[in-house]
Image (tube, rainbow, N blue to C red):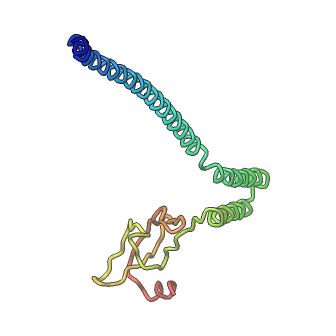
Amino acid sequence: MSDEKEEVPDLKESAASPEASVEEVLDRELEAARVEREGLKTEVADLKDQLLRKSADFDNYRKRMMKEKEEARLFANTGLLEDLVDVLDNFERAIRSSEAARNYDSFHSGIVMIEGQFASMLERKYDLRRLESNGKPFAPELHEAIAMEPADPGQDMVVIEEYQKGYQLHDRVLRTAKVKVGPATPAATDTQN
């Protein structure tokens, strides 16, 4: 009989073993969850740090772009202004020359020469061209009619007098010419051709 006793397992030990293994499993799962949680906390902290760094980088980039844009705006016309200073120098020389000579004709020719030089420089360097209007057909995209002579209905209208020149920058009208419009006459047609 003693052999029979050894074969029968103790109920307390078998009952304790499954509980112990459930507790051990739960402890292992809890520990794994804690480790995973710590890992997620670290990952979240790293992502927050990256976000703050990216945000700071973007803010610095935005400030740098604003500063560069402001500098570009302030100094965008440097080349043009350097050219205009030369024209101012020529005007000063013409004025000094006229004060000494008191000769209207030489002063007038000097001013005409400066105006031609100035217009030529603007066209050559900046592609700013004057619009030729006198004798040309009236075009509302190029001309602003501020005066008009009466004409018969359907009669072609041309620019008969230019009060203020118009200008074109590259292919865009910078300023329309202020003109007087009237009917096309044979003399205006001949001038146009």
Front in this rendered view, residue 2 or 15? 2
Front in this rendered view, residue 137 or 12? 12
Q: Quadrant of residue 158?
A: bottom left
Front in this rendered view, residue 189 or 44? 44
113 relative to 35, above or below? below
* Numbered circles on residues, count: 0
12 relative to 131, above or below? above
| 66 horizontally vs 156: left or right | right
| 180 horizontally vs 113: left or right | left
| Residue positioned most to the right | 100
Q: Could you tell me residue 38's position as x and y percent?
A: 40, 22
| 192 horizontally vs 80: left or right | left
Give me the residue at 54% from left, 43% from top: 69
Q: Could you tell me residue 161's position as x and y percent?
A: 46, 72
* Quadrant, the N terminus: top left
Q: Could you tell me residue 27's position as x and y percent?
A: 32, 18
| Residue positioned most to the front | 1
Give me the residue at 69% from left, 64% from top: 117
Give me the residue at 45% from left, 76% from top: 160
Give me the residue at 61% from left, 62% from top: 126
Q: Quadrant of residue 139?
A: bottom left
Q: Could you tell me residue 87's position as x and y percent?
A: 69, 55
| 68 horizontally vs 177: left or right | right
Q: Quadrant of residue 47?
A: top left
188 relative to 166, above or below? below
